[in-house]
Image (cartoon, rainbow, N blue to C red):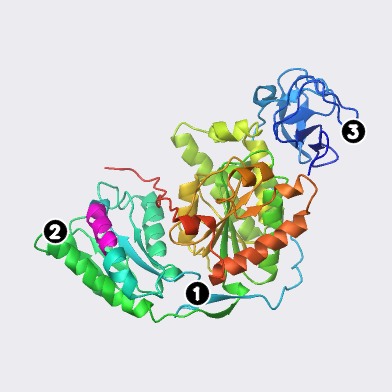
Amino acid sequence: MVEGPRYIRVHPGDNVAIVVNAGGLPEGTVFPSGLRLHQRVPQGHKVALTDISEGEPVIRYGQIIGYATRPLAAGSWVDVTAVRMPEPPALDDLPLATAVPEPPPPLEGYTFEGYRGSDGRVGTRNLLGIVTSVQCVTGVLEHAVQRIRQELLPKYPNVDDVVALTHAYGCGVAIDAPDAAIPIRTIANLASHPNFGGEILGVGLGCEKLLPDRVTPDAGRNVTSLQDHRGFSAMIDEILRMAEERLARLDQRRRVTCPASGLVVGLQCGGSDAFSGVTANPAVGYAADLLVRAGATVLFSEVTEVRDAVHLLTPRAANEEVGRKLIAEMKWYDAYLRRGGADRSANPSPGNKRGGLVNVVEKSLGSVAKSGTTAIVDVLGPGERATKHGLIFAATPASDFVCGTLQLAAGMNVHVFTTGRGTPYGLAMAPVVKVSTRTALAEQWPDLIDVDAGTIATGERTIEEVGWEIFRFILDVASGKKRTWAERWGIQNDLCLFNPAPLT
């Protein structure tokens, strides 16, 4: 536990630190270093360690996060109004593959109990998936899913659940626009997710622009179109008939021992705060290194939360081609934001700022800690599927729901989600492991947080100890030996496609 006033200074060159104590500290508090607070500073917010002149760099993580908008005396609260955001790193002159990490020593002997598919990929859950080609069928499908859960699932105890892949796409869209490839491949890759065991069912309408065969494997056998049926009851009967055929086959699936290399773990943060970059994200980064050493695939994402730290990542690219792909995704997103009249200053959120983050630069530096220390072996565009083992950057927006959807499309079978402010976020298609940045949040939400990384800030545990806990918890969750809190409560956010293409 924290005894007396305490702050965390991440790097010896930092001229600011964050307050650790729950509830913050009042004006006049004196730290063991002799620093005295000039005003109250909330928990997680920054205090100036030295006098900082107007226009002088504000430094955290050993990096410039901005420039002081006014003189800041040592002991001052460095709030969001005190820091002017710097320009983003220029993309054309970044070093590529100049500091590629050496391959880490293999971590052998770690396995989990998973569902091996005919294509070699491994599922962590056994689900009946029903994919839609157009939003028009959602209401009918929701009724059918309710019937499936009530009438059919009890007959097939080895099937965990039925998941409807519904979305706001499929008609009234520019189906042949270049950027339409993003939502279309996302839906198609969601439908082929290993947790569905190849037994996907497709439901279309019959007049949509997105033809079902573009998103459903073996569409001739697996798709029913509502306009082919005589009335609502006939539609439901046919969906239930086709669902039961697939449930009977899914019920025959059994878990088998699989090497940890069968894991595809997505990393994400949401409801972030200033502790994210010093507790939860570094611990997840340590776990990411363990997963890579064990042969697994690890995805980190969120373009706007990488953009301002990209200069730290391109040297880690496994080769120049990977580095160029990373830069290309940054450029594409810069252009996407400009088309919408926005820029990176739209991130962070008001809640992030209440948690102590002053701008997206500071947020990015904490966010990339999730990626650990290994080489980046590949870069995926939005909605693309991972085909390599190791650390991969999967380009996505920072929105929790969109990022989660795109990581599922990449093949993610376990999700690790760090949070400081707290969110009940969950996914139906894969388990979500929730890691808190602060012990106060874990105590506030004991039945929503799976791992408390806040003990790193209080000195009770190390980054390495929490990293190993997360790694082992991932293996247990993947095996079905443990269920996350989100699974136990059945918390499931809707899928949310990323569609930068025009509507018509």
Write the start and end of the magenta stretch as one range. 137-147
First along the sequence among labels 3 and 1: 3
Q: Please give the label number shown on residue 232.
A: 2
- Alpha carbon separation for disc pair 3 and 1: 54 Å
- Residue 93 visible? The answer is no
* Amino acid under disc 1: Arg
Please tell me whether residue 223 is drawn above or below residue 426 in the rendered image: below
Residue at the image point whose x is 55% and y is 31% from the top:
350
> Mark 2 or mark 1: which is in front?
2
Q: Secondary structure at mark 2?
A: helix
| Residue 191 as seen in the image, left or right of residue 416 | left
CA neighbours of label 1 inside 10 A, class few (<14), some (14 to 19), many (20+)? some
Residue visible at 71% across and 52% down in the picture? 282
Amino acid of disc 3: Pro
- Expressed as whole percent of the image width and height from the top left, the position of residue 313 reads 68, 51
Question: Which amino acid type is marked by label 2?
Answer: Phe
Find the residue positioned furthest to the left.
Answer: 230
Q: Which mark is residue 32?
A: 3
Label 1's element?
A: loop
Q: CA distance from mark 2 to mark 1?
A: 37 Å
- Identify the image quadrant of the C terminus: top left
Direction from residue 312 to residue 10 in the image, left or right: right
Q: Position of residue 177 (x, y in %)?
A: 34, 50
Residue to which mark 1 is pinned: 121
